[in-house]
Amino acid sequence: MIKFNVPPVTGKELKYISEAIENEKICGDGDFTKKCNKWMEDKFHILKALLTTSCTHATEMAALLLKIKPGDEVIMPAYTFVSTADAFVMRGATVVFVDIRPDTMNIDETLIEAAITDKTKAIVPVHYAGVGCEMDTIMELGKKYHIAVVEDAAQGMMASYKGKALGTIGDFGCYSFHETKNYSMGEGGALLIREEKYIEDAEIIREKGTNRSKFFRGQIDKYTWMEAGSSYLPSDMNAAYLWAQLELAEEINQNRLKNWDRYFERLSGLADKGYITLPYVPDECQHNAHMFYIKTKDLEERTKLIDFLRDNGVWAVFHYIPLHSAPAGQKYGIFSGEDKYTTTESERLLRLPMYYNLKSDDIDYIVELITKFYV
């Protein structure tokens, strides 16, 4: 069986985890956590990066920093993971869903303005498959209406829009280091902060509402409870696992891009004949090969192709069921405008195996099977 995903392993993970144990500092904000934070700050030219226990928690921190409250509205696509909405629903906000673009599966930036009301407090673009949203338009809307922009860049690390790293363009950016992501710490994430004014509050929220971070830096002689917060710090052992991959981040990125290109090249013939649709990457975007997907004619054809691939030893999967059609989505959200593409495009999309060191022969076998299915 060719698995859909294999978590990345570089070979130094156990060594670094052992070092964390030997350092007798396995809780949050140990040496490896600090290394990972600094690596992101230097690599992506962002003022502050803070490892978190998940991308969900990074987004929750953004919601807390923005003081999202009941009655507020937050705009996002319905084609995303539940965490994008949960972070704001947990604060009492109403989620306002906007249709997606069929080419990139990202939020349609031309439909956002119509969804803005005097209750709108944030826009949350989701960079699907590591392909950037049209951020210039989104940032202009944020500036025009004094609305914060929180980038859900869970899939976007090492990708960029017009040369700027995804996650560093909005007021906040949120990365995921889940087992399924390009870089992993099992469960984990990071909050990226662009403005100085949010940093101290972010550290307090992340440290259970205390100013413990300042205490450990020697800035105060004791720490105390300052504000409502939670424990958003990952174990330094998790950070140690991630550090082994950040050291080889570019190698992992290039390996994935090579595999993505191989899929694209070998499936282009089927796309040219109209059997399938391949991913689209706008010229201004540099993607990170987070996933490779194809689009079938419709839901029925996708189901048959999934079954055919599994019968022949390939694990391929569909992705999100749009949030506005879920029970919680109907309870906590509303859809602005027409669902022209969100549902129909989501029913066509099929994700193929994609991970670090996926074998070229396996890609060729998958392509052969897809070709056999159609031709």
Image: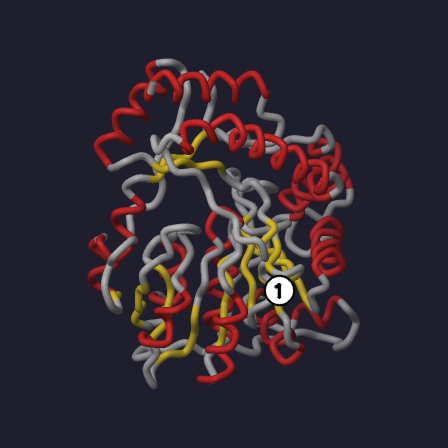
Tag count = 1
Residue 43 pos. (x, y %): 74, 56
Residue 83 pos. (x, y %): 40, 55
Left or right relative to 25: residue 209: left
Q: Residue at x 64, y 51 (%)?
A: 27
Quarter assignment of residue 212:
bottom right
Quarter assignment of residue 219:
bottom right
Residue 344 against residue 332 in the figure, above or below: above
Q: Residue at x 62, y 26 (%)?
A: 357
Quarter assignment of residue 47:
bottom right
* Residue nearest the observer in this picture, 19 or 147: 147
Residue 331 against residue 241 in the figure, above or below: below
What's the colour scheme?
A: secondary structure
Q: Which residue is drawn at 52% across and 43% down?
A: 178
Q: Which residue is drawn at 70% across and 75% down?
A: 222
Neighbor class of circle 1 (other Cα within 10 Å; few <14, some 14-19, many 20+) is many
Residue 78 pos. (x, y %): 32, 57
Circle 1 sits on which residue?
168
Residue 50 pos. (x, y %): 64, 61
Left or right relative to 110: residue 160: right
Quarter of the picture containing the C terminus is top left
Assign a secondary structure to mark 1.
loop
**Residue extending furthest toward the top:** 312
Q: Which amino acid does the dot numbered 1 rest on?
A: Thr
Residue 143 against residue 307 in the figure, above or below: below
